[in-house]
Amino acid sequence: MAVIGIPVRYDYDRDMNNRSIIYIFESLRRTIQKAGGDIKMILPIQDVDYMKTEYSDFPELTEEEKIKINNELDKCDGLLLPGGIKYSPFDMYILDYAIKNDMPTLGICLSMQMMTCYENNNNLELIESNINHNEPDKILSHLVKIDKESKLYKIIGKEEIMVNSIHKYHANESNIYKTVAYAPDGVIEAIEHPNLTFNIGLQWHPEKNYDEDENSRKIIDEFIKQAENRVI
């Protein structure tokens, strides 16, 4: 059984005086387990408030902290980088590990946006479009056109699909990742690292539609398959 590392996300608990919390989405837990994966939560390591600290204000990871993170990541066969409302240098370090170790990686929503910022310092921008990119969880709200030369196309086998969409910001082109899917309004919907076995970012949420949508199942199942086949 493939061990899938999932970094936790950060938020405030509105019912408990806005205390900072860390969590994983229940939809991720259920989907990865249904697909045959075993989940390992990857916890932040620095003694800071991850919600209140701005990205540029985080202290640099020490070598000791990097070793501790590496020890946790070494136990994983694949990494699922989830959506959320904020990412930190801790998350970017995990992405760096995945790239340098060619670990099967699937980035979703916010994490796809983070992937476009890897070594680029891209800014995320508010979407201005007649397409609604911020719909409820499972609604297949808009079309996505996929590059026929991409790994994503080989997985899905279709040039055009409908996807769910739950975001207000869009990513910009990356110098590291290749854009392999767009919405009709030009918003980037999927990216791939061209030199790695499986390192894909999606702006939509296949984990939320695993039971209902064949395309979502194909993506998640291939990710788990790549993690199972990884040779350390």
Image (spheres, rainbow, N blue to C red):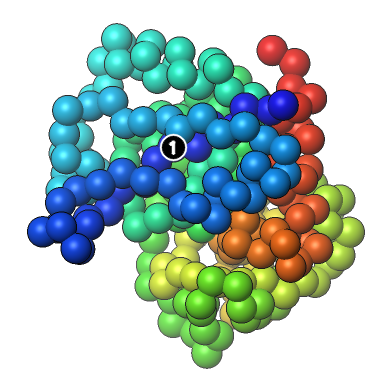
The C terminus lies in quadrant: top right
In terms of image quadrants, where is residue 71?
top left
State the residue position of label 1: 7
- Residue in the picture at 30% in, 11% down: 63
Q: Is residue 84 left or right of residue 109?
A: left
Camera-side residue of 204 and 138: 138
Toward the left, the furthest residue is: 17
Is residue 114 shown left or right of residue 10? right
Within-10-Å neighbours for mark 1: few <14, some 14–19, many 20+: many
> In the image, residue 108 lies at what x, y percent?
55, 53
Residue 19 position in % (x across, y down): 15, 51
Residue flagged by tag 1: what amino acid is it?
A: Pro
In the image, is 90 to the left or to the right of 218?
A: left
Q: Nearer the viewer, residue 172 or 115?
A: 115
Viewer-nearest residue: 102 or 148 = 102
Q: Which structural element holds mark 1?
A: strand
Q: Position of residue 147 (x, y in %)?
A: 78, 60
Q: Quadrant of the N terminus?
A: top right
| Residue at (60% x, 73% y) in the render | 138
Whether residue 122 is situated above or below residue 96 in the rendered picture: below
User: Which residue occupies 72% across, 62% down?
Assistant: 211
Q: Residue furthest bottom?
A: 130
Q: What residue appears at the point 62 percent right and 32 percent down from the top-left corner?
A: 38
The count of marks equals 1
Locate residue 205 relative to residue 10 in the image: left or right.
right
Q: Can you see residue 120?
A: no
